[in-house]
Image (tube, rainbow, N blue to C red):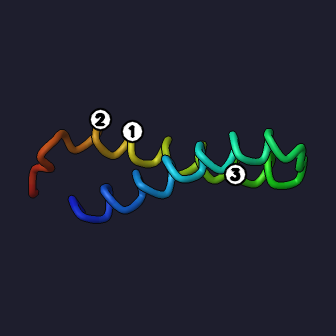
């Protein structure tokens, strides 16, 4: 689960970078999809870390 959170965190960061690049290019559809990807993956990472702690505890 730890490596998965790193990968999803990178996807969220790249989504935020994509939002800024899309704003620069004035591409509305790309802004929407990048913001949605950053929001969903970022929220998943944050809630997983809050729920399981860091480093994650095993049941």
Query: Which mark, residue 31?
Result: none
Q: Is residue 29 left or right of residue 42?
A: right
The image shows residue 22 at horizontal and vertical percentages of: 78, 47
The image shows residue 29 at horizontal and vertical percentages of: 88, 53
Q: Is residue 2 left or right of residue 44?
A: left
Q: Is residue 19 left or right of residue 50?
A: right
Judging from the image, what secondary structure is the residue with disc 2 in?
helix
Query: Which mark, residue 46?
Result: 1
* Residue ID for mark 3: 34
Instruction: Write down the quadrant of residue 6 in the picture.
Output: bottom left
Q: Is residue 42 left or right of residue 45?
A: right
Q: Residue at x 24, y 64 (%)?
A: 3
Q: CA distance from mark 1 to mark 2?
A: 6 Å
Mark 1 vs mark 3: in front:
3
Q: Residues within 10 Å of mark 3 (few under 14, many from 20)?
A: many
* Residue ID for mark 2: 50
**Quadrant of the snapshot with the N terminus:** bottom left
């Amino acid at each position: 689960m730890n490596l998965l959170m790193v990968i999803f965190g990178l996807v969220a960061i790249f989504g935020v970078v994509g939002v800024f690049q899309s704003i620069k290019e004035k591409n509305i559809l790309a802004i929407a999809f990048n913001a949605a990807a950053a929001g969903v993956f970022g929220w998943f990472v944050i809630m997983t870390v809050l729920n399981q702690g860091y480093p994650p505890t095993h049941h």
